[in-house]
Image (cartoon, rainbow, N blue to C red):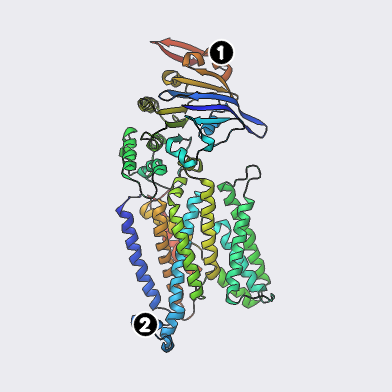
Amino acid sequence: MLTAKHITCRIGSKVLLDDVSVNFEAGKLNLIIGPNGAGKSTLVKVICNQIRPHDPGSVFYGDKNIASASIKELACIRSVLSQNIELAFPLTVTEVVMMGRYPHFTGKPEHKDLVACDEAMKFFDVSDLAGRNYMTLSGGEKQRVQFARVISQIWFPVAGSCRYLILDEPLTFLDVHYQFDFMHKLMTLLKNDDMVVVGVVHDLNLAARFADKIVLLNEGKVLACGNKHEVLSKENIKTAYRLEPVIHYENNEMYLFFS
Amino acid sequence: MGKPGNHYTGTTSFLLVLLIIFVLLSMCYGAVNISMDEIFSAFGKWLNDSENMTLNERIFMEIRFPRTLLCVFVGATLAVGGVLLQALFRNPIVEPGLVGTSSGAAFGAALYFVLGGVFKYNAGEWTLPFAACSGGVISTALVFFLSRSRQTGKSSIVALLLTGIAINALFLSGVGFLSYIARDPQARSITFWNLGTLSGANWHSVIITGTTTVICILVALQYAKHLNALMIGEDEAQYLGINIKRLKFTVLLINVFMVAIATAFVGVISFVGLIVPHLLRIINGSDNRFLIRNGALLGAILLSVADLTARMLLKPAELPIGIVTSVIGVPVFILLLRRKNYFF
């Protein structure tokens, strides 16, 4: 379980997050949605310990306050996919994926690191790209390599702790096929009941289709939080996005249209 | 592109053999040619009775051998400095001088050449290294201090880079001014020093440079993995468990220390720090563990070749080594860059 309590962030006089409290459960798909500038990325950075919230805000992984955890300690149980990762120098795909194992070994990778790296690459279908120069890959291929890197970091369960996977807009650069493919793979990962997944997405229909819990942020505050029926109401969406949706149900699935 | 494992070891062995060959050549050839027999007997006499050395043996022990060793250490230092800074700044155009170290050192040296006679206190043969080293440390500290953001107290890589360029320009114009007001022999010393020279090598400089080089490279190797992680970005490296603040500080410190000391003894030698990391990336990819280890070897080889050329070309006169590194380095570098599988 990941809990964020009373998170407030300001830069100068601009309020990015205003007393946000949310919790994300293990084994569930938690998605954060909201219009541009709503504070999604800031919230992600706060729960990754990249930005410290103002007092008395705090973030807990299980019962551990992350403000008192070391950078290395966190890296062993939590991995993060950021937006737009650019490599400074040419590296092979294997070398990039192996970075995910960096928190777990000093010096040379051990057997379990090689296994994690290999299995993560198989899981995201990038084994064929292993020897390729990362810089020559297409946007979608790069993104899948990054998935493999991020998941290899927390490939094995950790004694006494959940594993935390935090994804900031993971679906950018992916075509529809790979968007669905990725979401299905996330569902597979979530069969591990020690896996806490938090993602930011823009596609409301994907959120409706896959999310167990949706947090709708607007102007730095939680506008709604709960299952898709509670959050994706006409009123909420109109308030957040200033567009009125048409909501359509078919075979128990919910679809949103905008015109 | 990078093939892991055995391939790396292969490159290291190859470079090691090459280095030994060039070290031997460098010991034998120069203004005076010294045979292997004389070298062995010089070592023998050095251990037993150093009084009875012949002229050639004495030249070898007191001039040639220290020079060869200094060349190896300085080459290694410059190349590893280049590897470290390119990795730290995530930027392929960076070389060790970029954070102001060598321009500051050059300014310190120029100040010594022009004003040295004015000061009463003179530390003898240590004055020039001391002046250069202080210059290097002051300019680097200035870059570091001025690039700190007033709001956050952090210095971003881009701010560091830009401040470095500005401070470099400032100190180099200082060097220009000093050469302008200098009398002829002083101006000549400044020019020669700015183009680098190993002719001042002696056992003092070898021991000091050697110790710092070895220590700094050993420390740098401990940070290779951290620098690899930095390739995917600062935030990402932090998510991988790396303390970025400490990494930046340590790597910059290693670089300043190594480069300021090397520059203090041999002057400004350009280009080695820029090309060595690229040459190695073309051979084996960008893994910093590989780059640091083999960078030290390749830097030493390159500088040995350059020094040999500088000594042999206009024998018995000598060219500034910086000219040779550029003349040999540039065409090789451009040729390799134009290979189509090396691009960013």
Q: Residue A79: which disc? A: none
Give the residue at mark 1: A235
- Give the percent coordinates (x, y) of residue A75: 45, 39
Q: Residue B44: which disc? A: 2
- Give the percent coordinates (x, y) of residue A177: 37, 26
Q: Chain of mark 2?
A: B
Q: Along the line of sight, which residue is nearer the eye, B308 or B101?
A: B101
Does A3 appear above or below B240? Answer: above
Does B310 appear above or below A38? Answer: below
Does B123 appear above or below B344? Answer: below
* Cα distance in 3D space between marks 2 and 1: 94 Å
- Give the percent coordinates (x, y) of residue A168: 48, 31
> What's the residue type where badge 2 is placed?
Gly
Q: Residue at x 45, y 24 (%)?
A: A25
Query: Residue B173: in sight, yes or no?
Result: yes
Picture quadrant where residue B329 is located: bottom left
- Give the percent coordinates (x, y) of residue B182: 66, 73
Q: Residue at x 62, y 62 (%)?
A: B172
Question: How many marks can you see?
Answer: 2
Does B73 appear above or below A166? Answer: below
| Dot 2: element | helix
